Image (cartoon, rainbow, N blue to C red):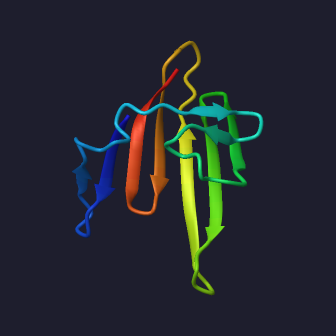
Amino acid sequence: MSDAYIKPGGSLDLMTDSPRVGQEFTVIKKSGEIVGDVMDSLKNPRIVSRGGNQQPYKILWEQKSASKNGVYLDYLSIDNVPGKEEKSFGFFSGSMLLAGVCR
């Protein structure tokens, strides 16, 4: 897994010393639940796409912020390529991007 942040100018800042690099997590596809230290605090997942026919599996989380009208959105997309055991993923949370391979 790699870890990056989007800089104010739009470029990526790759974090080579991040504690998340090398971490693992499990996706329970039926419910969208994530198990593992990386995204364990995310609750109430909404499955946007169950994947199939080369379409990615997609999960969205929406959480209210401390301010009245604020909201946090988190998004996970896992590629679905038939016949491939490893599937690439991207996880977005604010300006943070995690990317890697699912097995």
Q: Is residue 49 left or right of residue 30?
A: left
Give residue 53's quadrant in the image.
top right
Q: Quadrant of the N terminus?
A: top left
Q: Is residue 34 above or below residue 62?
A: above
Q: Is residue 96 above or below residue 77?
A: below
Q: Nearer the viewer, residue 46 or 34?
A: 34
Percent x, y of residue 9: 22, 68
Q: Is residue 3 left or right of residue 15?
A: right
Q: Nearer the viewer, residue 75 or 64?
A: 64
Give the residue at the far right of this rendering: 30
Residue that appears at 29% across and 44% down = 18
Give residue 12's quadrant in the image.
bottom left
Q: Nearer the viewer, residue 94 or 66?
A: 66
Residue that appears at 55% across and 42% down = 77
Percent x, y of residue 97: 39, 50
Residue that appears at 26% across and 69% down = 8
Q: Is residue 52 above or below residue 44?
A: above
Give residue 34's quadrant in the image.
top right
Marker count (numbered) = 0
Percent x, y of residue 75: 55, 52
Percent x, y of residue 93: 47, 57
